[in-house]
Amino acid sequence: MDMRLTTLDEDGWELDDAEPIAAAHPETFWMPPREERDALAPGQLVKLIFRILVADETGSEEVHVERMWVIVTGREGSLYTGELDNQPYCTEEMNPGMPLCFEARHVINIHRDEHEAS
């Protein structure tokens, strides 16, 4: 797997850095504490914000934003590896199981098992 973050220009999709969004909208945009986002383990489910470039019938491109779950598979330095756990609504070019890289700053939610203590 290519251990790098994607870009719209090179890959047709990228991840939003959620930290500036949370800082600008603290009352309405919650995200897990940094300590939790820095301590993710393989098997955990995390939600990320994807920006996906999609061409319409006329060939013009538009950016769609989707929040999707990713299964954490590993970590190398500050870069996490994971696999997409959702099928995006806007494209069939990305599918569940697709490998990707992300950082703690991209994580907007961590799935918690119902039996897990808060």
Image: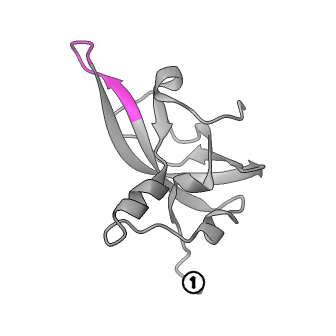
Q: Is residue 43 magenta?
A: no
Quarter of the picture containing the C terminus is: bottom right
> At numbered mark 1, what does the secondary structure look like: helix, strand or loop?
loop
Q: Is residue 58 magenta?
A: yes
Left or right, 109 with reference to 34? left
Q: Residue at x 52, y 69 (%)?
A: 32
Residue at the spot of label 1: 115
Q: How many marks?
A: 1
Q: Residue at x 31, y 68 (%)?
A: 28
Q: Quadrant of residue 63?
A: top left
Q: Residue reaching furthest right?
A: 76
Task: Determine if residue 94 is in view.
Answer: no
Left or right, 22 with reference to 90? right
Q: Residue at x 59, y 41 (%)?
A: 97
Above or below, 109 against 112 in this view is: above
Q: Residue at x 26, y 16 (%)?
A: 60
Quarter of the picture containing the N terminus is: top right
Left or right, 53 with reference to 72? left
State the image coordinates of residue 80 (x, y, percent, origin top left).
68, 49
Above or below, 101 against 69 in this view is: above
Crowding at dot 1, Cα within 10 Å, few <14 / some 14-19 / many 20+, comes out as few
State the image coordinates of residue 92 (x, y, percent, origin top left).
41, 30
Q: Amino acid at mark 1?
A: His
Magenta residues, start to end = 52-60
Left or right, 32 with reference to 99? left
Above or below, 86 against 34 in this view is: above
